Amino acid sequence: MSTDKLSEEEKQTLLHIARESLERGVKGEKLTQLDLESMSPLLRGQGASFVTLTIRGNLRGCIGALEPYQPLALDVREHALAAALDDPRFPPVKPEELNQVEVEVSRLTVPERLEYKNADDLLANLRPHVDGVILRDGFRRATFLPQVWDKIPDKAGFLDNLCYKMGASQDLWRQKHLEVLIYQVEEFHE
């Protein structure tokens, strides 16, 4: 992602795309064709996003990409649909839930490797409420968006939970040197 911030109009366009994708997908309707040519360069350009669905503040689905591989507008559309129908942690969103679901879009910067010497150094280099964190251990990987710091503000607890999400023991980050990447997000919601 470039360092250019999205305009209010671009954010509203992405939220509209996410909402329409969510509603059509849940109802089993065909998605409308996106007219990328009529969109701004930021929406047409490559971008990585996560779409988070909540009901009354509780997570209902969250799917995204860590690396850009398609136009941002298409990325948001794809992940809104996937968050509703394909998040393995939840059953698919039902049509009767649609009016309760709130949509949040997070546009990601390109992840950068965080260099650190040991577990204490890793803790010292984490920036709560600023950085999203990706942990990698071989083929396993997991990420938490920066918004997760609101629920898990303790740095060690954040890493414990991220290891657990990755399918590893919670203290793996203390036991071995993992690949750690950080990114920031531009987050907005309905």
Image (tube, rainbow, N blue to C red):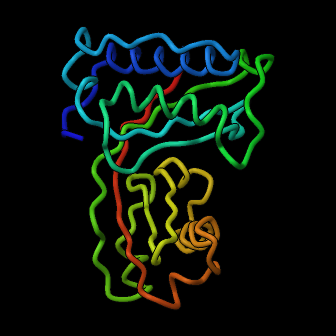
| 148 left or right, relative to 39 | right
Query: Residue at image x 65%, y 43%?
Result: 87
Seen in the picture, residue 51 relative to 66 is either above or below; the reply is above
Residue 162, located in which quarter of the rendered image? bottom right
Please provide percent x and percent y for residue 168.
Answer: 62, 77
Query: Residue at image x 63%, y 78%?
Result: 170
Please provide percent x and percent y for residue 60.
Answer: 70, 37
Residue furthest right as drawn:
96
On-image quarter of the N terminus: top left
Seen in the picture, residue 30 relative to 168 is either above or below; the reply is above
Seen in the picture, residue 19 relative to 187 is either above or below; the reply is above
Please provide percent x and percent y for residue 112.
Answer: 27, 62
Please provide percent x and percent y for residue 22.
Answer: 60, 21
Residue furthest front as drawn:
30
| 5 left or right, relative to 136 | left
60 or 137, nearer to the observer = 137
| 164 left or right, relative to 135 | right
Query: Residue at image x 42%, y 80%?
Result: 178
